[in-house]
Image (cartoon, rainbow, N blue to C red):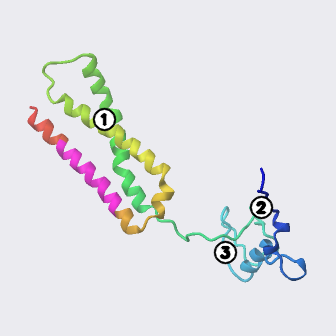
Amino acid sequence: MTGTYLMDVEDDPTTKGEGGRPLHDPVAEVLAFLKGRSVPCPRCAYDLRDIQTARCPECGEPLVLKIGSPRARFGWLVLAMAPGCFSGVAALFVLIPVYMHTRYPSPAAKGVWAVMVADAFGFLSAASVALMYRHRHRFMSWTARRQAAFAGAVWGIHVLVFVLILLALWYSQ
């Protein structure tokens, strides 16, 4: 590759202070942060107060300082995924009678198309849960208001489809 190269951190002039010493030492920063402070180990919850190395003495987990959210809030995501999970499980159970009807059709069975539509919606809803899980990091970056609106829209769509299917079943009798 012409014109591009990787610079080692040790060669980077922006990481050097006076006398060529590093501007900041990650191990020293961890130890300074934990000095006189009770902080649990992220893996085993051991109290790391005044430790001497940047490694948990209990479980051996290497310790690093990083910026993050103190508490990730998954409530709106779980609320948005709940109807899709239920619909997917229900669709699996409804698949058996739908299959039996397609295999052995009965002229007395009315409204079977509505049940088939409900089953298809259940599987699509379960697929949407998989998509929500796949894009959960993007969802978590949204504001709480936008997350709530999304969860409300998901619930609204599920309630609307449920009512429409009930009406279809009612009028097909």
Residue at x-position 82% and y-position 73%: 13
Residue at x-position 16% and y-position 30%: 111
- Amino acid under label 3? Val
Secondary element at image label 2: loop
Residue at x-position 32% and y-position 29%: 95
Task: Name the chief secondary structure element in magenta.
Answer: helix
- Height in image: 109 above or below 156? above
Secondary element at image label 1: helix
Magenta range: 149-164
- Amino acid under label 1? Ala
Q: What's the distance in space between the residues labelled 3 and 1, CA to CA?
A: 50 Å
Classify 10 Å Cα crowding around label 3: few (below 14), some (14-19), many (20 and above).
some
Q: Which residue is mark 2?
A: 60
Work out whether mark 2 precedes mark 1 in sequence or the reverse, and give the earlier one. 2
Q: Which residue ends up furthest to the front in the rendered image?
A: 2
Classify 10 Å Cα crowding around label 1: few (below 14), some (14-19), many (20 and above).
some
Q: Which residue is mark 3?
A: 39
Q: What's the distance in space between the residues labelled 2 and 1, CA to CA?
A: 50 Å
Classify 10 Å Cα crowding around label 2: few (below 14), some (14-19), many (20 and above).
few
- Height in image: 143 above or below 119? below
Tell which tag, 3 or 1, sits nearer the viewer: 1
Residue 126 spot, x, y in % from top left: 38, 42
Work out whether mark 2 precedes mark 3 in sequence or the reverse, and give the earlier one. 3
Observer-nearest of 62 and 138:
138
Q: Quadrant of residue 92?
A: top left
Secondary element at image label 3: loop
- Amino acid under label 2? Gly
Q: Which residue is mark 1?
A: 120
Work out whether mark 3 precedes mark 1 in sequence or the reverse, and give the earlier one. 3
Residue 82 spot, x, y in % from top left: 37, 51
